[in-house]
Amino acid sequence: MTPTTDDITRWSACETAERVRRREVSAVEVIDATLARIRAIDGKLGAHLSIDAEGALARAQSVDTRLARGEEVGALAGVPIGLKDIFIARGRETTCASKILRGWIAPYDGTHVERLERADAVLTGKLNMDEFAMGSSTENSAFQLTRNPWDLGRIPGGSSGGSAAAVAAGLCAAALGTDTGGSIRQPASLCGVVGMKPTYGRVSRYGVVAFASSLDQVGPLARTVEDAALVLQTIAGHDPRDATSLPHPVPDYRAACRRGVRGLRVGVPREYFVAGMDGEVEASVRAAIAELSRLGAELVDIELPHTAYAVAVYYLIATAEASSNLARYDGVRYGHRTAEPRDLLELYERTRAEGFGPEVKRRIMLGTYVLSAGYYEAYYGRALKVRTLIRRDFEKAFARCDVIATPTSPTPAFKLGEKIDDPLQMYLADIFTISCNLAGLPGLSLPCGFTQGGLPIGLQLLGPPLGEEAIFAAAADYEQATEWHARRPPL
């Protein structure tokens, strides 16, 4: 029986690639179904900033042609994948959801685009985000709101909210996001999908517009753990064009998904179960940890005593690095330029005032302040020292366990507009994800329940540096023992 559009857009990335390789369905049929789904749904979801229908169909046709000739195709043959609009792709607009980059056409491909296309993935479009990845709700986009597919009155999380919403709604089989303080894992949790932030340096940052260079990392969002493993395996590995890229070989992450959690030591930190977190979130996460124990994991109580300082440390280091990185947007070389400035100073001032949104301006000002003479050591220098203490907390914890299990977000998705005028409350939405970035660790979020109102809840699994295999083993075993990942939003 010929698969319908609904059938095709429900397939996992692994299943799609396998069916295309076996010629049970053509890559063109997959992309036709995906584009039809986008046309039908995205008008009310707002996940895409741009769609490359012509390029996607041409790429799919190339895959089908080579298969007809009997040629080998890549591991992601015909799989539709979306890109957060922070990834540079030759000949395509890259805006970072900011007016200051509107209309900028990238002159080259980033490493991620090269590796995905080498694996015969089909890149379908650019996805909405918080401007320059600064936010936790995707409400800071300069262009449009993205809505949570489980409740169109709620946020999808951020900053990779467009990526998470698109995957959850079946607008692509997988997507790439970036994670500076939780921007893959938090929206994955709020949209009921899998999001993986790998070890810092595991994936190249070449071709990613920088926010905070010592924290940014690239990773996949997908519907299943094995899909996330497949995409990560495709994009990971050393890249000489990124000085922070690690030279270590890439393991077989898909094989790790079949190892199971039995025998693994799972650490449970009391600091991640705090007063004020949503009761349904805590109940679901504790039930998930109990399920890991039932599957054969050994639960270990651990302590991460400097967790309470993570948010403050993050918003000193990240804003300082953002202030430095965003200084390049001056109206001289590329991007928006104000009209008819009287002199160079006015060119800078008006270009940035017109081009940057409120949250980006807030973070630039905070970062410039903490780096200024007389304040550097009191703020930025001290934050770096506490960052070291946070990393040492994890080193001690991982001497006693193999992975750490925590909530991903303290609450389910909140309503649009609920926190946009309260930056502190918005920043606290990342309280459970930030430490992972400060320590350079891998972390994954996967569905572990739903609220009575039908909103997804995420379980976060953290590992030691280059500990992705243990995370995938535990996550895949839990996923197969439960049915949360099989639910689809009622769109």
Image (spheres, rainbow, N blue to C red):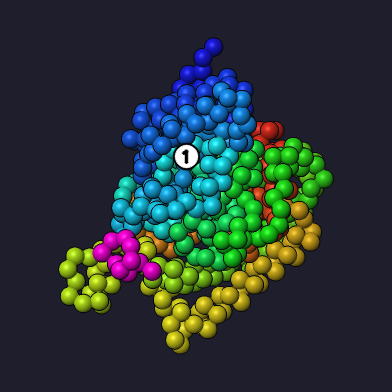
| Magenta highlight on residue 450 | no
Q: Main secondary structure of the magenta part?
A: loop
Identity of the residue drawn at 71% across and 53% down? 249
Q: What residue is at 33 percent from the left and 57 percent from the top?
A: 101
Left or right, 361 with respect to 240, comes to left
- Local crowd size for mark 1, using a 10 Å CA cut-off: few (<14), some (14–19), many (≥20): many
Q: Residue furthest right?
A: 263
**52 displayed left or right of 468:** left
Q: Is residue 17 above or below residue 82?
A: above
In this picture, is 316 found above or below 296?
below
Q: Which residue is mark 1?
A: 123
- In this rendering, the answer to whether 21 lies above or below 438 is above
97, 192: nearer the viewer = 97
- Residue type, mark 1 in image: Leu
Residue sitting farthest toward the bottom: 374
Q: Position of residue 325 (x, y in %)?
A: 44, 68
Circle 1 — which element? strand
Which stretch did the figure color magenta?
A: 328-337
Tell whether position 332 is magenta. yes
The image shows a total of numbered marks equal to 1
Left or right relative to 113: residue 152: left
Q: What residue sits 58% from the left and 39% below the top? A: 119
Q: Residue at x 60, y 33 (%)?
A: 73
Q: Is residue 13 above or below residue 406?
A: above
User: Would residue 403 be visible to someone looking at this image?
Assistant: yes
